[in-house]
Image (cartoon, rainbow, N blue to C red):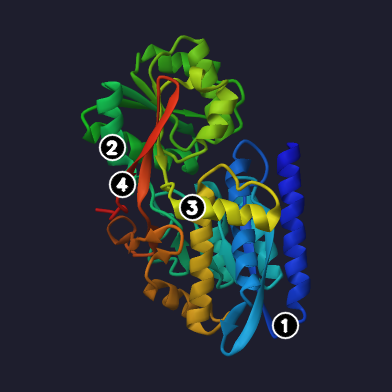
Amino acid sequence: MKLRHLKMALSLAAAGLALTGQASAQDCEVKLGAVAVLSGPAANWGQSLRAAVAMNVKEVNDAGGLNIGGKKCKVSFVALDSKYSGEGAAAAANELASQGVKFIIGPIGSPEVTGAKPVAVRNNMLMMANSYAKDAIGPKWPLVFHVGPGASGWADPIVAEAKARFNIKRAVVVAPNDQGGTDVASVDAAMYKKNGIDVTEEYYQRGTTNFAPIVLRILSKNPDAVDLASSPAGDAGTMVKQLRQAGFKGAIGRLGGPSTDEIVRIAGGLDVVKNMYWYEPILRTPAIDQVDVKYKKMFNQDVPTITFFYQWLAGSRMVLKAIEAAGTADDTAKVAEALRKLPVEDPDLGKGQWIGQEFFGINQEMSHPFGIGLIADGKYLPVIAKPAATGK
């Protein structure tokens, strides 16, 4: 683990322990569980989730706690490593259930969400999860909410912009060969086809470290763009590096979300990446800048670089607001009902909307304005702002 990540883990763990200790002296305590990938090539995703929950917990406690039925309740949290696997997420959810935790923030990946959902259902736990799986949420799981829309909500305008900017006629979409990859890559591929781009899909075994064979297959298709979809940042950065070493000159896509800084670092710098486009879930605004300042004051360290952090912060805030609105931290069905009725509004992200009915059959997916991230000729360009996805 890098020194920066170790310091972050120790700082956030200490914050969590301190909050738990404070809670014992209060009228009541609400405990959140953060199920997050904290090891392996996708660890920066989970670290942003854990940091967001820590910030939300601290800001609520600093303001006096949650007002639940006339009682001021302290909030605490425990973060468990899901290891970016269904088994790891299920084990984490079971451990949280044994501790009496009723509210889970996370997980982020489709394998994790698939593993955690049955545990949450059995134990009546409310989840504010991510995942771009085609069954991430649905009527069968009324206590599972989506922190942000999947590729069906935002991939189309990103592909259209990339096609025009980088003159893309042929593309290859690459992802791991499990649900966390196939569900995203297939939707991405459909969006390329919709925009008149010839597209093929390639899949690799999760845990691969040498991508030379798949790089050769990609190059044999002579694409203008390679979209890394939902591949973890560590995998994506390594693939970009090997693609460039093998002579690929086209654009790099990343419709699975951010992690751009980490991908650039692993690949060898902006000059190596050269041209790239990606889904940016958060638009940088003065309000977001102030979140960074506030986080630094709270934890004496910089905010995580991956912008999923702000999305998780908004999702965690919504769950705690729903608990207050419902007047209970025990009846998760009542909290879910209150959450559905709350407007999607965050003090830093602004106003959004609930979507999901058309794609998932249930309106339990938060949608905020998003952006198209771009690197052109080795330089970051301003993010192109887009309105909140409607799911239609």
- Residue assigned mark 4: 386
Q: Residues within 10 Å of mark 1 (few under 14, many from 20)?
A: few
Circles 4 and 2: CB distance less than 8 Å? no
How far apart in space, not on screen, are marks 3 and 4 (Cα)? 17 Å
Q: Tell me what residue is drawn at x 54 percent, y 72 percent.
A: 320
Q: Reading the chain from its start, which is encountered first: label 2 or label 3? A: 2
- Residue assigned mark 2: 191
Kind of residue at badge 3 = Ile
The label nearer to you, 3 versus 1, is 3
Residue 107 seen by the camera: no
Q: Position of residue 350 (x, y in %)?
A: 39, 60
Q: Position of residue 354 (x, y in %)?
A: 34, 64
Which type of secondary structure does the marked residue at label 3 adopt? helix
Q: Reading the chain from its start, which is encountered first: label 3 or label 4? A: 3
How far apart in space, not on screen, are marks 2 and 3 (Cα)? 30 Å
How far apart in space, not on screen, are marks 4 and 2 (Cα)? 17 Å
Q: Position of residue 388 (x, y in %)?
A: 32, 54
Q: Reading the chain from its start, which is encountered first: label 4 or label 1? A: 1
Q: Reading the chain from its start, which is encountered first: label 2 or label 1? A: 1
Numbered circle sitting on residue 288: 3
The label nearer to you, 2 versus 1, is 1
